[in-house]
Amino acid sequence: MYDAGSVIGGRYHMKANTRILSAAVIIAAAMLAASCGQKATKNVPFSGVWKQTDENLISAVKTEREMRIICDGKRYRIESDSRDGEYSRHSTEIFDGQNIYAKLDSAYSSPDTAGDAATLENKGFTKIKIDETKAKKIRDEWYNNPVPNFKKGTGGMIAGVETVFYEGIESRPDGEITLQVWVDPKSGLVLKSVFQIYSKQVEQLISRKTRECVSLQAGAIDESAFAP
């Protein structure tokens, strides 16, 4: 779920950056999927709000979104609001244990419309059948403990929870990929993550994705949360 941006410096840099961005997705997924540290006894039910920022540091483009996540340990609901210039988007994704129901609403507003938004897309839910393996990959973005050889330290308070900080670095001939995570040691919830890519071709950071929990509630989840 990591977004790649545009590049500069000609065709050579474009190809180099495309390679490192593609590799970064695979390596970051492997870092998280290989987690085998202290495991929570079970996936705790929770609801919370995360702020996510995606930065393309070459083109100086930054996008922000707010994500509201509800999960009972298996089923989940993700609602996301984002804005890119004059375009705003609201997406909903629900996994009811067997199927994903996805929906995207988008609108356009500009000074010419006096603040009124024109709806571009407002469709109903699309039903997609997925297996438990794919659903788990999505849940593992929240329920996760980093691999044991990650650098470990005190993470401080995030959303009212004392966290443990982990950092993993993957060095490659064409660059370096860094993944930092702040984890609640009791529940195993990832409350903050920073994923960034450094390119040796352009000798700078080219991409950074930050996701941080700003509010969190634990406890039973109402059944209506998992209905489209």
Image (tube, rainbow, N blue to C red):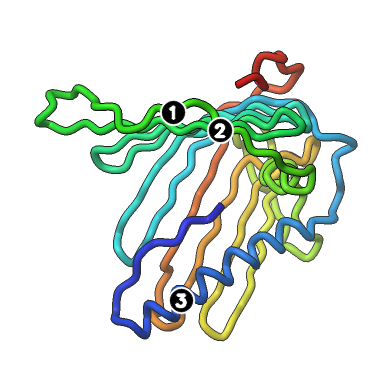
Residue at 44% x, 63% y is 207
Residue furthest right as drawn: 41
Which three-letter amino acid code belongs to the residue tagged 2? Answer: Thr
**Pointer 1 residue:** 123
Residue at 70% x, 44% y is 183
Work out whether mark 3 precedes mark 2 in sequence or the reverse, and give the earlier one. Answer: 2
Residue furthest left as drawn: 112
Which three-letter amino acid code belongs to the residue tagged 3? Answer: Ser
Q: Nearer the viewer, residue 118 or 154?
A: 118
Q: Mark 1 against mark 3, which lies toward the viewer?
A: 1
CB contact under 8 Å: marks 1 and 2? yes
Tag count in the figure? Answer: 3
Instruction: Measure the alpha-carbon separation of dots 3 and 2.
Output: 38 Å
Q: Is 30 placed above or below 91 here?
A: below
Instruction: Measure the alpha-carbon separation of dots 1 and 3.
Output: 40 Å
Numbered disc 2: secondary structure: strand
Residue at 74% x, 41% y is 143
Kindly tell me whether residue 214 is visible in this rendering. Answer: no
Residue at 64% x, 38% y is 128
**Mark number, residue 126:** 2
**Quadrant position of residue 26:** bottom right
Q: Is 25 placed above or below 176 here?
A: above
Q: Is residue 208 left or right of residue 164?
A: left
**Pointer 3 residue:** 199
Report x, y in % for residue 6: 35, 65
**Quadrant position of residue 118:** top left
Report x, y in % for residue 24: 57, 67
